[in-house]
Image (cartoon, rainbow, N blue to C red):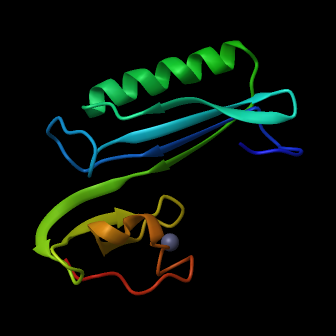
Amino acid sequence: MLTGMAEFDAYLIVDWSASARPVDNKDSIWYCLQLREGDKFAVSALENPRTRHCAAAEIANKLVRLYAEGRHVLAGFDFVVRPTGLPGTDHRQYIYVLQRSRCGHKYGANGSDIHLRRCPKCDGGAPGLPF
Ligand SMILES: [Zn+2]
């Protein structure tokens, strides 16, 4: 739970998946929605939809409802462009292609450290893995 002043009424964070097949838990889509209640925030949703289609529908419905309520929402998405099937440099990992929307640069990362990666071109991140 967060406290204090915030710029937004709701925060939606989405960890997308490169998997084209229905999956859950590891290497799947997760999202969390926190809503302001007075001067505090509470988790409104913590979901693990099995498919991209379900995730997109659920997230769109939530955003439409939040918009209708007049809430100011900050939404963050973590998208993987595609898996490569190439072996990564971390234990039992494969290389995934990431792309920063700001600059368009594509770079490779182990599945285990996608969440830690920063763009090597515009955000001071480590060089990407070859793909
Ligand atoms: Zn960049």
Q: Is residue 49 left or right of residue 41?
A: left
Residue at position x 15%, y 66% in the image: 84
Identify whether 26 is placed above or below 118: above
Image quadrant for the N terminus? Answer: top right
Residue 13: which quarter of the image? Answer: top right
Q: Quadrant of residue 43?
A: top right
User: What x and y, as percent, mark residue 109?
Assistant: 31, 73
Labels in figure, total: 0
Q: Position of residue 39 (x, y in %)?
A: 87, 34
Say if 37 sits above or below 1 in the image: above
Q: Quadrant of the C terminus?
A: bottom left
Q: Is residue 4 left or right of residue 93?
A: right
Which residue occupies the foreground of this view, 61 or 33? Answer: 33
Give how far across and how far down residue 113 sits, in percent: 37, 71
Q: Which corner quadrant of the image does residue 23 belong to? A: top left
> In the rendering, at what x and y percent does residue 56 appear?
38, 28
Q: Residue at x 32, y 30 (%)?
A: 49
Q: Is residue 28 above or below residue 106?
A: above
Q: Residue at x 35, y 64 (%)?
A: 98
Side of 122 where 7 appears, left or right: right
Q: Residue at x 54, y 21 (%)?
A: 62
